[in-house]
Amino acid sequence: MNQKVVFLQALIVTFIFFNLGIFFGYMLESDRINKINDFYSRSEMDLLDQRIQKEAFDIVSLDCNRAIQANIDFADKIFEEALLIQRFESANKLSKDVILQHKRFDMLRTLFWINSIKIKEKCNAKYHNVVYFYKFNEPTIEQKAKQAVFSNLLEELKQEKGSEIMLIPIAADNEIISIDLLVNRYSIENLPTILIDEKIKIEEVTSKEDIAKYLD
């Protein structure tokens, strides 16, 4: 009888801890999604402001220095938020909500890239657009290793160069038509690939200098 009581108590305790684990896991995931949503909302508002600035160029003459600085500030925010989002995604990459928000960020970053091109042309800005195309869905072991190297080197380069480069990471395999069109336009065939100033493609890199030599 005592053994049955002990077994029943152990079963109850196990059941309680199991459900607590599910509950806290759910709360952690919800918090993660809320933070990503918050990042997206703030970035979306900033980019909308920039898009309005760009459209205003066609109507009135705007201050290019302010437009360039706003673009640089937004690029810095993209860089910082990308680092945080990467940590959130690594905790539960398969979440449908996380994948959906990732697609939204990809579209947001693509809009920023287009806007950055136009501001650079209009204002003769000296910064470099550095777009990092990578594989998000089920990368091979080789791709994971390669992307880890690319990401680390680009992060180091951004920290070193600062406002001289607009570092824009974009997943190229999320079946987003606008991104697919740009991928085809610039003949991005292998992932990962770094595209510099819409002209130079880098598919192999072993050091920071392999990228930096195109930014002089």
Image (tube, rainbow, N blue to C red):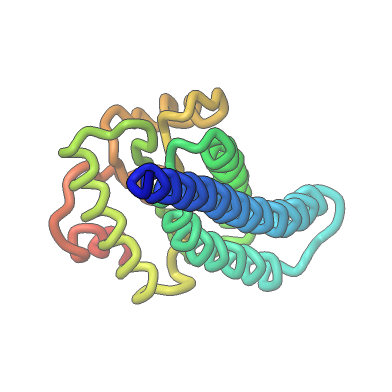
Work out which quarter of the rendered image holds the C terminus and state it.
bottom left
Front-most of 93 and 214? Answer: 93
Q: Position of residue 107 (x, y in %)?
A: 59, 39
Q: Is residue 41 above or below residue 139?
A: below
Q: Position of residue 64 (x, y in %)?
A: 69, 67
Using the rendered image of the protein, determine whether residue 58 is visible from the camera's viewpoint.
yes
Q: Is residue 137 left or right of residue 148?
A: right
Q: Quadrant of residue 214?
A: bottom left
Front-most of 130 and 10? Answer: 10
Q: Is residue 102 left or right of residue 134?
A: right
Front-most of 93 and 72? Answer: 93
Q: Quadrant of residue 72?
A: bottom right
- The residue depicted at 30 percent of the width and 69 percent of the height is 156
- The residue depicted at 42 percent of the width and 33 percent of the height is 172
Q: Is residue 55 above or below residue 82?
A: above
Using the rendered image of the protein, determine whether residue 116 is visible from the camera's viewpoint.
no
